[in-house]
Image (spheres, rainbow, N blue to C red):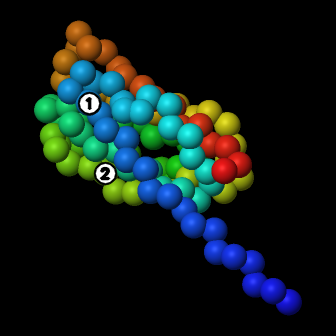
Amino acid sequence: MAEKPAVKSALYTIAIAGSGDPVPPDLPVGPGDKIRWRNDLGKTITAFALPSCVSPPTSPAPIAPGKQTRSYTVKKGKLGRFHYAYVWDDVAKGTRSGVIDVGNM
């Protein structure tokens, strides 16, 4: 019986830019891939709601300027578009968000 080839997972980094927007704003990934977020905002991200497609479900907030989160794994069996959101201490800017688009990659 032949062995199945190992499926490689990718590691993606989403940057929270100085504008407050995520780069990229919509990230296509596959089950088993890993995602992390990097704070390039210049201010501490005080709250972060993770997308439900990743594990562990523990919020990485607060995220200090210049720091990145741990790696989160995209759950198997979770296909679709999943939103995440974050805020920092600038009420005028409001909540920002992005999308993780999980497909059969």
* Residue visible at 20% across and 48% down in the picture: 67
Q: Spot the residue most to the bottom.
A: 1
**Which dot marks residue 34?**
none
Can you see residue 47? no
Give above or below for 56 relative to 3: above
Q: CA distance from mark 2 to mark 1?
A: 15 Å
**Which dot marks residue 69?**
2
Under mark 2, the amino acid is Thr
**Dot 2 alpha-carbon crowd within 10 angstroms: few under 14, some 14 to 19, many 20 or more:** some
Give above or below for 41 relative to 5: above
**Dot 1 alpha-carbon crowd within 10 angstroms: few under 14, some 14 to 19, many 20 or more:** some
Under mark 1, the amino acid is Ala
* Residue visible at 62% across and 33% down in the picture: 81
Q: Earlier in the sequence, mark 2 or mark 1?
A: 1
Can you see residue 30? yes
Horizontally, is 15 left or right of 67 in the view?
Answer: right
- Check contact, mark 2 vs mark 1: CB within 8 A: no
**Image label count:** 2
Give above or below for 5 relative to 48: below
Q: Spot the residue most to the top.
A: 92
Which quadrant of the structure image shows residue 17?
top left
Q: Nearer the viewer, mark 2 or mark 1?
A: 1
* Residue visible at 66% across and 56% down in the picture: 76
Horizontally, is 91 left or right of 99 in the view?
Answer: left
Q: Secondary structure at mark 1?
A: loop
| Residue 28 locus on image (x, y percent) | 56, 40
* Residue visible at 16% across and 44% down in the picture: 66
Q: Which residue is tagged 1?
A: 17
| Residue 35 locus on image (x, y percent) | 44, 50
Which quadrant of the structure image shows residue 61?
top left
**Image quarter (top left, top right, bottom left or bottom right) of the N terminus:** bottom right
